[in-house]
């Protein structure tokens, strides 16, 4: 197998294929159809199923293609096999040269904390969130799961000359906690031109797992147009539990729930692999009934999510010894500390990392003095008034720059204007005659 320098064609066993074919060229080269009439019929059949480009066939299973009206069971295998060849620019079986080539395409996204970056150190020495890799963040409430996701999104949008990717982000919010106004202000802190968010940020509010699946399908159609580099699902299990409650008389929901979870995770993995994306999803820890409902250290989702996740990271609060040894025992009121631990991965060690949680999302404990100063300024001003490099930011049009004025206004609405209270007259005591 070889590919031209321009990557316009690739060769397998002496046969030259287009690397970026039109649908007509794809069908011809697959052998599914060779003349104009059958090709037109197949293009119309695929279009009727919402498939306009060959890359939309990547990762589709044979039964899925066979179900498309107008695609016969005899022709479907040609389409699926050639989609696999086109995706990999070669046969499914790889030699060392192609393995090296595949691994050279990995990209690495900063987390926002150098301690977390070091925790995610790979065999080639690179650090951070890795593309084509399923990263799961799980932990209890207020451990920073969403904050890590927000910061990762900012890093993807951040300019390249500041260590970012200048890529788009697709964010699936299943808990309704995402707020665009706050995210824009966090993005400003990390040096993002927030005018770029308009064309580089996709958001879906998914209230059930069917909507998560629909969102992933729509994201797949927009990846090239929006130059998406990161997909985030926050959280993966919440909408699944809503759609498939399990407990008591509802145990029959368990099997279809796990099947649906696997289908969605497979789709997410395909998108990551095909498009070289970073994929991050959050998860909850399960309650241990034997311990009176106390949290366990295991994630929800069972074996399905455990096998799908390439890196599983448990988030928690550091203990007093860890706080002291990492200089995190005297944080100001607007910062908290978090601890992360890789609990399962085939290629990253079971390392620990630490991070700060604050108005900027997460931040670097090794830059504690700077971050503390920034957090204090932001708390005093009441808006994002400084960026990560200490540059002063002008308030946005809808920033409230005087909270005291707002508080006084609300107080007046509730209690009326402040009035002087009448002075209480104090009666003098009569002296008792001796």
Image (tube, rainbow, N blue to C red):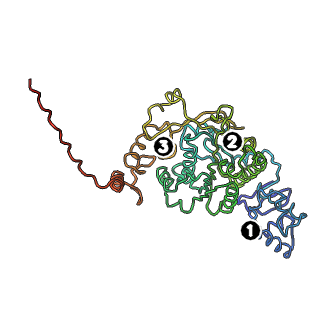
Can you identify the residue that label 3 sits on? Answer: 358
The label shown at residue 300 is 2
Rendered view: 358 above or below 29: above
Q: Name the residue furthest left.
A: 434
Q: Is residue 76 left or right of residue 19?
A: right
Q: Position of residue 24 (x, y in %)?
A: 79, 70
Give the image quarter of residue 314. Answer: top right
Q: Where, by quadrant of the figure, is residue 143 drawn?
A: top right
Q: Point out residue 339 in the picture as x, y percentages from the top left corner.
A: 56, 35
Marks 2, 1: nearer the viewer: 2
Report the front residue among 431 and 173. Answer: 431
Determine whether the residue tagged by mark 1 lies in a helix, strand or loop.
Answer: loop
Give SS at disc 3.
strand
Q: CA distance from mark 2 to mark 1?
A: 37 Å
Q: Residues within 10 Å of mark 2 (few under 14, many from 20)?
A: many
- Residue at left 58%, top 44%? 145
Cα separation between marks 3 and 2? 27 Å
Disc 3 to disc 1: CB gap under 8 Å: no
Disc with the residue nearer the chain's start (3 vs 1): 1
322 vs 257, nearest the viewer: 257
Identify the secondary structure beneath mark 2.
loop
């Amino acid at each position: 197998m070889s590919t031209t320098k321009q990557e316009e064609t690739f060769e397998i066993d002496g046969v030259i294929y287009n690397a970026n074919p039109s649908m007509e060229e794809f069908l011809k080269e697959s052998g599914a159809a060779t003349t104009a009439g059958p090709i037109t019929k197949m293009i119309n059949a695929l279009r009727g199923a919402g498939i306009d480009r060959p890359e939309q066939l990547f990762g589709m299973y044979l039964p899925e293609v066979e179900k498309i009206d107008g695609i016969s069971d005899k022709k479907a295998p040609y389409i699926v096999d050639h989609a696999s060849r086109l995706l990999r620019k070669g046969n499914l079986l790889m030699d060392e040269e192609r393995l090296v080539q595949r691994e050279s395409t990995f990209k690495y996204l900063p987390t926002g904390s150098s301690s977390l970056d070091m925790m995610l150190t790979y065999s080639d020495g690179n650090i951070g969130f890795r593309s084509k890799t399923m990263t799961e963040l799980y932990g209890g409430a207020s451990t920073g799961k969403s904050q890590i996701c927000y910061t990762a999104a900012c890093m993807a949008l951040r300019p390249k000359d500041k260590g970012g990717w200048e890529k788009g982000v697709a964010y699936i919010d299943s808990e309704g906690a995402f707020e665009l106004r706050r995210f824009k202000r966090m993005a400003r802190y990390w040096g993002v031109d927030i005018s770029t968010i308009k064309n580089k940020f996709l958001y879906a509010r998914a209230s059930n797992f069917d909507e998560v699946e629909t969102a992933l399908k729509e994201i797949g159609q927009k990846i090239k147009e929006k130059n998406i580099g990161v997909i985030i699902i926050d959280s993966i299990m919440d909408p699944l539990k809503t759609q498939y409650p399990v407990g008591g008389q509802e145990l029959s929901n368990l099997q279809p729930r796990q099947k649906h979870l696997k289908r969605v995770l497979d789709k997410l993995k395909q998108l990551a692999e095909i498009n070289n994306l970073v994929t991050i999803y959050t998860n909850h820890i399960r309650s241990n009934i034997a311990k009176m409902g106390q949290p366990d250290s295991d994630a929800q989702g069972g074996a399905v999510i455990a096998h799908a996740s390439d890196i599983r990271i448990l988030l928690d609060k550091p203990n007093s010894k860890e706080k002291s040894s990492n200089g995190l025992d005297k944080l100001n009121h607007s910062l908290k500390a978090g601890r992360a631990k890789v609990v399962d991965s085939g290629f990253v060690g079971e390392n620990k990392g630490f991070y700060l949680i604050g108005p900027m999302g997460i931040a670097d404990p090794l830059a504690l003095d700077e971050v503390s100063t920034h957090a204090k300024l932001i708390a005093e001003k009441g808006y994002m008034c400084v960026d990560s490099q200490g540059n002063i930011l002008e308030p946005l049009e809808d920033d409230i720059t005087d909270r005291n004025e707002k508080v006084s206004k609300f107080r007046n609405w509730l209690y009326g204007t402040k009035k002087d209270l009448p002075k209480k007259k104090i009666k003098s005591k009569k002296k008792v005659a001796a």
